[in-house]
Image (cartoon, helix red, strand yellow):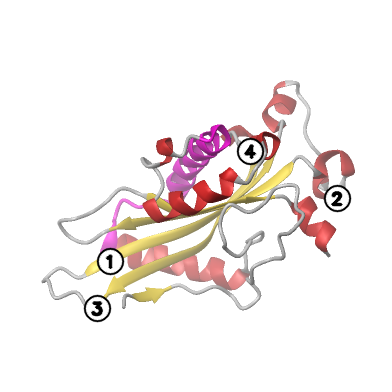
Amino acid sequence: NPLQMRSLSSDDAPQNTQKRSLPPLMDFPELVWPTVFKSVRNWILVNFIIRPYIDKDFNMPDFVIGAKQALQAVSTRLSDGDTAGLNEWVSTECVGEVKESLRKMSVAQRNEIRVIKEDVYFSFPYQVGIIFDEDNSDNAQKRWVEITMIFHALRGLRDMQERGENPPINLGVMPEYRDKISICNYRFIKEFTKGSESDWTINIVNHFKPSDMLAED
């Protein structure tokens, strides 16, 4: 089995997702905020392993920009029910699970999935992982980099800013904004094996609403 330099914290347990306004797309722990430990570990992995030994041109700010673009492209296809259009971005296994979830959603619920990148007001890499395949018999050791991104989005933020309005810092606790906030977890993976590098692919896609989580507390 591949040696995986990543793990989920013990409190990242799956949530009770029954009777939610937005059902989950995949069975994956719902991640909301960064942790100090993971943030420090991510910085170490990027600066002392990935850039020196795997990809000298890797740049996290540029990656985050690209991840937001992927979020918009994938969420738009999900909202439209265009699972065939996901193949360019998303792994086959992920598409299969998401497809089943979309079938159970109403049109209104699918519309909640759509996110434009300008509506994202907070985004960060939750976890960076490096995976090595020690069982590989070839000369080139197989290796992958995996990055879990978290996006906080406010529906209509772009329109507000175009009108010169800025949402308050405590928008998450204000009723008029609470139902418009969604959180997206996307996990990206790329193979960096010498001679067989791949493009970034998404293998986890999840959208959920903090208002649903508050209702369960």
How far is the residue under mark 1 from the one under mark 3?
9 Å
Query: Which residue was labeled with disc 1?
Result: 143
Residue 195 part of the magenta-drawn span: no
Query: Which residue was labeled with disc 2?
Result: 173
The crowding category of the residue bearing disc 4, from other C-alpha atoms within 10 Å (few below 14, some 14 to 19, many at least 20), is many
Q: Residue at x 23, y 54 (%)?
A: 197
How far is the residue under mark 2 from the one under mark 4?
24 Å
The local secondary structure at tag 3 comes to: loop
First in sequence: mark 1 vs mark 3:
3
Dot 1 and dot 3 residues touching (CB under 8 Å)? no
Query: Which residue was labeled with disc 3?
Result: 134
First in sequence: mark 2 vs mark 4:
4
How far is the residue under mark 4 from the one under mark 1?
35 Å
Magenta stretch bounds = 53-81
The local secondary structure at tag 4 comes to: helix
Query: Which residue was labeled with disc 4?
Result: 110
The amino acid on which the numbered mark 2 sits, given as a three-letter code, is Val
